[in-house]
Structures are given as C-alpha cells and as structure tokens.
Image (cartoon, rainbow, N blue to C red):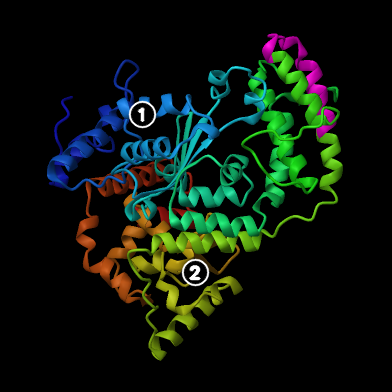
Amino acid sequence: MTLRIISRDASIFTSICPQNNPNLATPRHNGPDLKNVLAVCDSLRETKSDLEGTSIDFMKVEVQNGAELLRLHQMILMHLPSSLTNVVRKEMADIVRNIFQGTVRKVLYCALITCPWYSATQSERGQKAKRNSLLVVYQSHPHQFLAPVNHKIKERDSESVDLDWLYAVEAQFFARYLIRGKSRLIEALNVGSVIHEDDSFVRLKSRLCSLEVTQLQGFVDQSLGQAFGLVGHKSKDGRLTLREKVVLQDFCSSFRLLWYCDLVLSGQAFHIDELRDVDSSSMAGQALSLLTTAYQQHRSGLMPEMLDVVIKWKQSLDKLRKKMKFASVVEIERCIGDFLVDIRTAEFSILPDCALTPENQLKVETLLGQAGSEAVRGMPASDILLIAQAGSHLYGLKTPDSDIDYVIIYRTPLKTILGTCRTLTESSECRGPEKSVEFGTYEARLLTEMLWKCSVVMLELVFADDLEYVSPLWKVLQDNKSVFVTEKAIVQYLGLIKNNMALIENKKHSGKPRERKIFYQA
C-alpha cells in the first residue's frame, strides 16, 4: 500500500486509517507492524502540518551543541571558586546565555558547583576541578510554561537539561524540588562561586537564607537516605553490605551529604565550597582520611572501611535528627511562590476576575449543589467555565432509568498557577453503578491537553448546544469550534466506533443496560 500526504478532505484521510483498511487494522504475520504504520501516519500528519504552517511546536529546551559548549566545559574543568575572576565569570555567563538563546526566556542563575570532598583529596590543582559541574536556573517562555501537554512530558522536554556536567532546570522545576529538599538545588543556593544571578534571584536567596532553607526536613531526610543508598544496601539477611560496582566518587557524594546533615543538625554554619576545620578525630575527619588515602594510593580495598564510617556517621546523625526542629515548609513555599509570580508577571499584569451576574451566580451555585459532594459545592462560581450533563442526556437519548452525569470545567486562578510549587490537582470524579448522580471535574489546563489529544468527550462538549451553564470563556471555544475538526480527531472517532462495534459483535453485553450505551456511543 502506498502512503500519501494527507488531504484536508476527511474522506481521503480515511484511506490510510487503520480502522478502515483491513491490511492495516489486522497486520499479517509477515506484513507491516501496526504500531510502525501508525507512527508513519503520525509523521506524515506532522509533515503536512509543517508544510501548511498549521503545526504547533512547544519547543523542547535544548542547549546549542558547538564550540561554545565545548569551551564552557573546558572552563568548568579549569577553575576553582578561588580562580573565578570577574573576567572569567563574564565569559562563562555570556556562553551560558548564548547556548540557551531562543530556547528559554531568561537565565536567572548560574553557579559553579564543586565537590569539596573530592578536591580535598587531590594535591594537584588541575585535579581538584575534575568533578566540577555547572547549575543553571532559567525561566521558560510563557507558551512552554502553559503548554497543553502532560506534566511528565513538560518536565522531560522543557523543565530540565542534564548533561552530567551541566544541570539546567526551569524556575518552577527548581521550586517544586527545592521544597522537597533536593540537595543538588539547596547546595546551589549556598555556593560562593556564582557566575551570574538575576536581581530577582538575589532577593530570593536572601529571603530563603533568613528562612533557613537548609533546615527543611526533606533535605535532611533525603540526604541521610541517599548517603547510604549510594554506597550500601541491606541484604536479605539484614546485613548492611557494600553495593556492587560502587566507586570512590560515590563515597565522595555520600560523605558530602552526611557532612551537610552534620552541619545542619549540629547548628553549624552551612558552607559547601571547601572543607573547613575538620577535626581528625570526628566522623568527618575519619572519612576524609580514608578517602584521601584511597585516592592517593589507589586503594579501592578501603571501601569496606569507608562503608563502616558511613553507617556509624549516619547512625549518629539519626539520633540528632530526632531532636531537630525543622524549618517551616509553608513559609518557604510562600516565599518561592512570590518569586515565581514576580518573574512571570514582569511584562504583564494579572487582570481582576470578572464578576458573575446575580442570575448566573445563583444558577451556577444551584447546579453545583445538584452535582453532589461538598468539594464541588465549595467551588467558587466565578471559576466555573462549563456545567453540562453528559452521556445519554447530551445525545437526547435519556430514559427514566438513565443516571445523571455532570461534567464540570473550572479554572484555577492565574496567580495560583504561576506561583505554585507543587503539581496541582486537575481532575476529580465521583462515579459508580450505585450512584444516581455522577460527576467529573476538569481544570482548564487539563481540558486544553485533552482537546489537543482530541478527546471525544471534550470535543462533543465544544460542539454541543443547550448546555446547563456556559461561561463567556467557553463561548470563545464554541465560536472557534471549527479548528477542532482535525484528522487526529477523525482517527479518535473512528477508533471509538471500531471498539464499540467489536463489543456489539461479540455480544458480551447483549441484553444488558450497557449494550444500549455502546450503541448510542457508536
């Protein structure tokens, strides 16, 4: 079969649709694999939309791989915090901006991260910088931040870049994992080797320092857990043994995390650029002595002894942890949230919400009360975009036995979206055969994602008339509903029809209430 560029005419598109072509729908043993054929079809649709100028690219964040990236890597491996002159900082900052140019809106922060435990074991200056890395915090473009794509896809494609020696994160990714206590981000706030920092980030650091972000429980707990997990594991008989394929660098990381916890739990000043005043008789002193000997004399056989130090050091810190009064996550979260709102709204203002008329206010509140739970009844009426009865009622096929199924589309206030440090809940459902009134709630961002994926349920709501409540914003969607008639939507509908016809033909639900629903959906 010959595949061709797809026409705007839906009837031509069906010629390559697997639901309408038996050669594609049921591939023979030696024939084309269905997944591969569908991948080719998707690729052709993307090519066609590119040629037509109708494609939408949410722009994956990538660094420009070239001479400047190589130069930056070389500079990172050449310098220690003490050798970072203003000239060097400026050159590195310029390169960072250049390699991210166009793909992000703004670089907010950039710092050279060293491993003081590795540096302290090396006598040659050139070797001390061998484990250096660069951490970058950037702000994405609004269309990336608000893209109607799955959170996991967005986190993978536009919220982080990890080249091992260069770790770049988007501002909201930074916020989300900072409040969880991610050590890689918290240590970046306490380095002296800053390459570049935006004024907004300077203010954030100052406020977080006063709120003692290093005393977050998540930071201490994660650091203690990772410190052992990097180098050891618990065997089936309960013994703590050395992890397979562990290397000396793992012990550097383990000792560094334990050292952070020791500073925090013992109330000492938190610093990470270098080891200071390490008592040789302390756990840190014993760890440093073993690690230095292992590196300088190439004695990996010392790792069992180092594991013993890790275990004893962690046990002593576990006792201190029980007495620790940790910092307030709420205060830190509020501080970071204000920072996120400030950087997002630097070029625009958040408009006040439009008040509902008394008539619409009463209508929405009444419908929410009919829908069910306290959570739904408590939703602000001004945030409701749509209330509709779905299912047989929507198709005009309801019977006295039909249940009531409400679909509620709502919006989260923009300031909340811009300033959140967490993944917001975007849907809830209350459905089941024993319920006479069912409902599902969907946040506006999730709605856009479902429309982008051509969800049949959501498309039908856009095209439906006489819905229970329609806000002015929903009317904007309805006024532009023609743009949702896409080839991908046709595939979704054909797939639904095929699946329902298969259920009808195998008579699995013959004579049951479910059969009627399958018929009217098809």
- Give percent across and percent down for residue 103: 31, 43
x and y percentages locating residue 125 in the rendered image? 56, 21
**Residue at screen point 85% across, 23% down:** 239
Residue at figure coordinates x 73%, y 43% from the top left: 221
Mark 1 Cα-neighbour bin, 10 Å: few <14, some 14–19, many ≥20:
some
Q: Position of residue 220 (x, y in %)?
A: 72, 44
Q: Is residue 452 magenta?
A: no
- In front: mark 2 or mark 1? 1
Corner quadrant of residue 228: top right
Which image quarter holds the N terminus?
top left
Q: Which mark is first along the chain, 1 or 2? A: 1
What number is the disc on residue 69? 1
Look at the numbered disc 2 and give the secondary structure of its residue. loop
Q: Which residue is mark 2?
A: 401
| Principal secondary structure, stretch drawn in magenta | helix
Give amino acid for label 2. Asp
Up-down: is 166 above or below 491? above
Using the rendered image of the protein, determine whether residue 230 is visible from the camera's viewpoint: yes
Crowding at mark 2 (Cα within 10 Å: few <14, some 14-19, many 20+)? few
Q: Which residues are magenta?
A: 295-313
Indicate yes or no whether the magenta region holds residue 311.
Answer: yes
Of the residues shown, which amino acid type is indicated by label 1? Answer: Leu
